[in-house]
Image: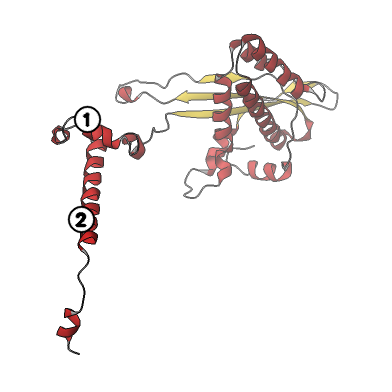
Amino acid sequence: MTETDSTSKIKKRPLWLRLVAVACIGLTIWHVYATFLWVSPPSELRNAIPGNALRSYIQPMFGQSWSVFAPKPIDGDYSFEVRAMLEDTSGKPSPTQWVDAVNLEMGMIHRNLFPARASLAGNQLASDYRTGWQKLNDRQRDIVKLGYFKGDDWTQRLARELNERAAKTGSSQKNTMSFVESERTASAYATQVAKALWGQEVRSVQFRVGRQGVIPFEQRNKPGAIRPSPAIIESGWRGLTVRDGQNEQNFAEVFNSLEGVK
């Protein structure tokens, strides 16, 4: 059998299959073109598609915007400051200075291409706590400022007070319980930081969460422009909290190795 005979026996693709292929190619070209017009800045090119055809095609199934490719950048710094109440041999309590755990943890990120996830623990906690606090009403926020540290049931008493304020004002119980969980996590984290820094003499802890925005974009080139003042959320004193799975020894070993600690 010759090459010519072999070639002559190759069957052509059915007409319907070729039509489907052409339709798929055309649809792909149209989709790429429509997506390009939609995500690009407005221009006269959009007028090539009459009426509302472009919007009707893209939305809602293929809706995109520049935020997909350039999401909102970080525009502020968080802080999670901790201090502790110590008790000396005479039984006299004395507060420590404030220490910003987030600032210390950032040392794990600087000049490190592959930072550990632990480097973002305090930063993420501060963000979550602030988000939960913003959903509380004013009467609940007043409760957060009070001290809850006496006895073994201080966590339950704090949660009960917050829930009662929510019920009296018609606020969301779901948001309240979510904040209570953030409170417990923050108290546990503050406990670990305090014990890592000041040892077993710690009797209670206090923390405050802050956020300071960067210089607004439109003022970036303005001489003398300064950052906005930080917004601080301050809690009252809290009892020591230890959650399941915590390892104070391992935490202290890592935390005390950070640059700037002690």
The quarter of the picture where residue 128 lies is top right
Residue in the image at 70% along x and 46% along y = 250
User: Image quadrant for the N terminus?
Assistant: bottom left
Q: Secondary structure at mark 1?
A: loop
Q: Nearer the viewer, residue 234 or 183?
A: 183
The quarter of the picture where residue 33 lies is top left
| Circle 2: residue type | Val
Using a 10 Å C-alpha cutoff, classify the residue at mark 2 as few (fewer than 14 neighbours), some (14 to 19) or many (20 or more).
Answer: few
The quarter of the picture where residue 191 lies is top right
Which disc number belongs to residue 22?
2
Residue in the image at 71% along x and 15% along y = 161
Q: Secondary structure at mark 2?
A: helix
Residue in the image at 60% along x and 33% along y = 101
Which disc number belongs to residue 52?
1
Which disc number belongs to residue 209?
none
Q: Position of residue 55 (x, y in %)?
A: 26, 32
Q: Position of residue 31 (x, y in %)?
A: 25, 45
Q: Position of residue 104 (x, y in %)?
A: 57, 36
- State whether residue 68 is above or below residue 84: below
